[in-house]
Amino acid sequence: MGHKRYHIKSACPQCGCSFAQVLSKEEIKERYGDTPNIELECGECMLKFETDRKSACPEWDDECRLKEGEA
Ligand SMILES: [Zn+2]
């Protein structure tokens, strides 16, 4: 069993700079829990903004759906 890495991509609504992060499932759970929206902080203008988890990380959403299917 490997440790899958998830790519989270978004863009700051204020300055438009792109934002990318690679996190493990554990890191995501620790930071964002199970909420449908995740909070990100722009590295350029320090704006905190929320983004839809589905659009920020489609592969993560797929994984969640698979989990639900197993339950
Ligand atoms: Zn920004």
Image (spheres, helix red, strand yellow):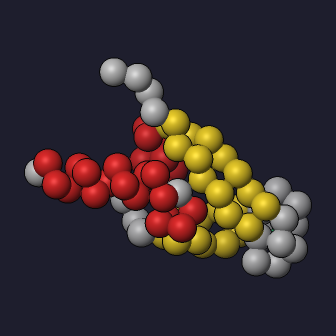
Answer left or right for 57 relative to 34. right
Residue shown at 28% from the left, 57% from the top? 65
- Asked if 23 appears above or below 47 in the picture, the reply is above
Circle count: 0
Residue 44's image quarter? bottom right
Compare residues 32 and 58 and report the one nearer the observer.
Answer: 58
**Quadrant of the snapshot with the N terminus:** top left
Residue situated furthest left in the rendering:
71
Residue 56's image quarter? bottom right
Tell me residue 45's x, y (percent): 87, 66
Compare residues 11 and 38 and report the one nearer the observer.
Answer: 11
Residue 36's image quarter? bottom left
Residue shown at 59% from the left, 47% from the top? 7
Residue shown at 11% from the left, 51% from the top? 71
Tell me residue 53's x, y (percent): 49, 65
Answer left or right for 67 relative to 36. left
Tell me residue 35's x, y (percent): 40, 65
- Asked if 12 appears above or below 62 in the picture, the reply is below
Tell me residue 21's x, y (percent): 66, 47
Residue situated furthest top in the rendering:
1
Is residue 30 in view? no
Is residue 35 in view? yes
